Amino acid sequence: AFAIGLAFFLERLSRKAADDRYSYGYRRFSAAAALVTGFILVAGSVYILSEAIPRFFDPQTPHAQGMIAMAFLGVAVNGFAAWKVSRGVSLNEKMIVWHLLEDVLGWVAVLIGAVIIQVTGWAQVDALLACLLACWILYNVVRNLKEVIGVFLQMVPPGIDLPEIERKVRALVGVKDIHHVHVWSIDGEKHVLTAHIVAGTETATESLKAQIKGILKQAGIVEATLEFEPPDAHCEDPHHH
């Protein structure tokens, strides 16, 4: 509950506009919340595994009828909450969905396990379902965490083809070269680029800028800072990485 509450609070905070202190805005608070929630989910899944594995060798037979009643309530409450936030697109909202989904599927596993225990008496099924659920959640959360960590390490965002962008810019009439290209994401949604453009002439700068920003917009980059240089400019490090 604390993790979900913190995630929602930081998600609301991330919508604040830029100010003198946070010139890019507060959007990275959303990614920070996703990072915290992701690590909590990993820790929770590891804990479930540590509790479930020993029960294979020392099974305990729970009260199946009580488990069924609690499972229906848990699925209903957490399922409704997961449905309410399932349309979210930010990394944080996706991680919240996984958190709620873990709870929903946990209760589904309890329900299935309780029915099997009541019918067959096979007590180990509870531990088996818990391990399967924990491994599935771990796999998906770690995959999402890699994207979140990539935001903080300022990796080129997934789906951004940097060589292709450079190729298209170099193909424009009036562009001699492009270098010092850097692309990163503020929060996994808003992508930013900076680059040095070597122009063939100094007269068509505004026209070139508009064309380049059109290319960047098609690539999913919403904000760009372009520095134009004369043809005879000397650059010691022309690489983009």
Image (spheres, rainbow, N blue to C red):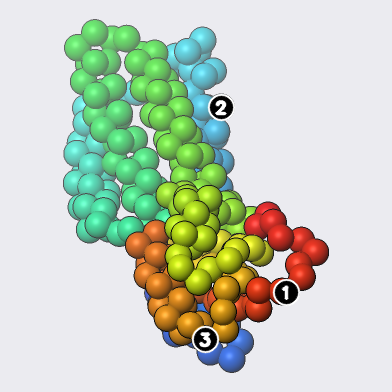
Residue for badge 2: 50
Q: Is residue 101 above or below residue 114?
A: below
> Which numbered disc flags the more N-terminal residue, 2 or 3?
2
Does dot 3 land on a helix, a strand or a loop? Answer: loop
For image coordinates 51% across by 27% down, the residue present is 49
- Residue 29 in picture, x, y percent from top left: 52, 69
Say the numbered circle drawn on residue 203. Answer: 3
- Residue at the farthest right position: 236
Question: How many marks on residues?
Answer: 3
Q: Residue at x 32, y 43 (%)?
A: 101
Q: CA distance from mark 2 to mark 3?
A: 68 Å
Q: Is residue 204 above or below residue 150?
A: below
Say what amino acid the circle numbered 2 marks.
Answer: Ser
Q: Nearer the viewer, residue 30 or 68?
A: 30
Q: Which residue is mark 1?
A: 233
Tell me if residue 24 comes above or below residue 67 in the rendering: below
